Image (cartoon, rainbow, N blue to C red):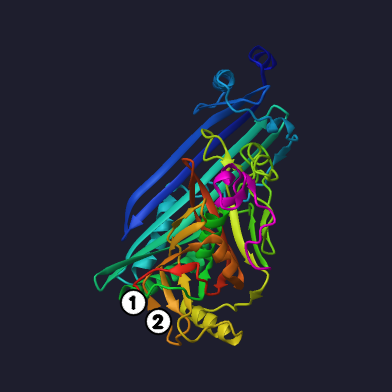
Amino acid sequence: MDQLFKENGLEYIIVRLESKREWGMRLSNGKFERVSSGWDSGIGVQAFTEEGVTGFASSDVLGLEAGLKVIQRAVVLAERNAKIGAESNRMIFKTPQLVEEAVDPRVYPFEHFSLAQLQELVLGLHQRLLKHNSEIAWQTSYRQVEDHWCIGRSDGTRVSFVIPRAVLMHQGTVRENGRAQSTLVNRSGVDVEILLKEKEDAILEKKALERAELAQEVCRAPQLPSGHYPLVIDYGLAKGLAHEAFGHAVESDHIKESVLGENGKLRKGLKVARSGVNIVDGPLLGDWAYQPYSANGLKRETVEIVKDGVLIAGLGDIFSAEEAGMEVTGAGRAESYGYIPIPRMTNIRLLVDQEIPLPPTSTLKEEIQQVREILKEKGELREEGKHLLLFGYRGGQVNPKTGDFVFQCDGMIDLADPSLPVYQPSIFSGKIISALQAIRGGLGQGCYDAIGTCGKSGQAVPSSGGSHRYLLLEQDEQVSLGGEQG
């Protein structure tokens, strides 16, 4: 290896080994639509010249001989890139050595049940849903993943970890008054334990049925006039706001195009929210988006992005953090061994110091009624006009240059009316800083299991996060709900 370096003017390499396997299945109205199993493994190598110019190569074959060939290809590419004047970056040479192995958070091994046994277990959970209401079309899916990584660097760094993920999802579709409305709920964890718990306690089943009942009400509901309203948003929508509207805006590779950047640097010290509002990103053991180390072999740090309303840090990887005026936080993630890591979030949480307790209830309707009563008791409920609770997150998009966001929810409930009338889904839009500055409190303890898949630069990685059970937002002229013109 040393001779290879000397002959090619190379000074440094990063080697990423990955082995991943996955089982999955999908049922629709009592029948299996798909049962799948997959396995993938390979090696990815970044080679660096003495000047810091890099080349990247990968292979889906693991082994010494194949690995040496990948290194050679990466060396050749690094040399070619150096000759054509490609950008150089020597920050990786300054990174301290790290030798660690992360704890495996699983209770059960990947093959604790056979694929056939899993089918039987998931079918039983699916059939329980079908017995409740024949008018609802139900789809159930289950997925479990075992993703092993080993990352080595020329400085002697060796980190290894396994990322186990499992998720059970129920999607219900209702049709009424010529309209169709669907709802999606999930229960996630690290292994098949989520199925065993669901078989015992039926928490997801109950949640799915309650959301389906709410979806039926949405089908019958009127549309709300567009305008500006005081809001209560659930933690799934809050995660979307934190992730899409804020998290991406502080990733170090795109800070030049971000509303939270200035002259290519993060605008540290910028007041973006009220005192007491905080945004934190970092790995949580057993979480859907858990990753203890970056794909460059650095420890993944928990970052206070916003503290007490002030922007103080960003998500920086080893190659772009310095230029963006940030600290390196080990934020580099890669979809697989075949990709170069880029700065990404893991679990992002939007938290408020002023938390109003929300005692547990037995049903969703009781919880919403309790939200109304607590807000009224605390003087936080506007009883004239409308005070809207938004539930469910259906995705959206953000313009990082301007800070404009557009999100979709599942539906809305007017808390100002004691009868708690339901309205059709509406577009939740505005300016990200205005939305943050409108946050005035949190209701209930933290809920951080709002999961999804985040796409960026052609790579898809698991994402998650949340907030308090609900966030309270005051009326703001820069935050709107779309719908019929009032």
Q: Is residue 457 above or below residue 170?
A: above
Where does the image place residue 242, in percent across and percent down from the top left?
A: 56, 59
Query: From this viewpoint, which residue is outermost toward the front?
Result: 263
Using the rendered image of the protein, determine whether residue 289 is visible from the camera's viewpoint.
no
Residue 345 coordinates in the image, percent (x, y): 58, 50
Task: Tell me the SS state at disc 2.
Answer: loop
Residue 380 lies, with reference to residue 255, above or below; the image says: below
The stretch drawn in magenta includes residue 266: yes
Cβ–Cβ under 8 Å for marks 2 and 1: yes
Residue holding disc 2: 421
**Residue 437 appears at what percent x and percent y?**
59, 67
Q: Amino acid at mark 2?
A: Pro
Q: Which residue does the image show at 52% across and 35% down from the upper left?
A: 339
Res. 78 image quadrant: top right
Query: Which image quarter is the N terminus in?
Result: top right
Crowdedness near tag 1: few (<14), some (14–19) or many (≥20) residues, C-alpha within 10 Å: some
Dot 2 crowding, Cα within 10 Å, few <14, some 14–19, many 20+? some
Label 1 is placed on what type of residue? Ala
Residue in view at x 51 percent, y 74 percent: 231
Q: Point out which mark residue 221 bears.
A: 1
Boundaries of the magenta span: 248-275
Residue at position x 65%, y 63% from top?
Answer: 278
Frontmost residue, 100 versus 105? 100
| Residue 133 locus on image (x, y percent) | 32, 72
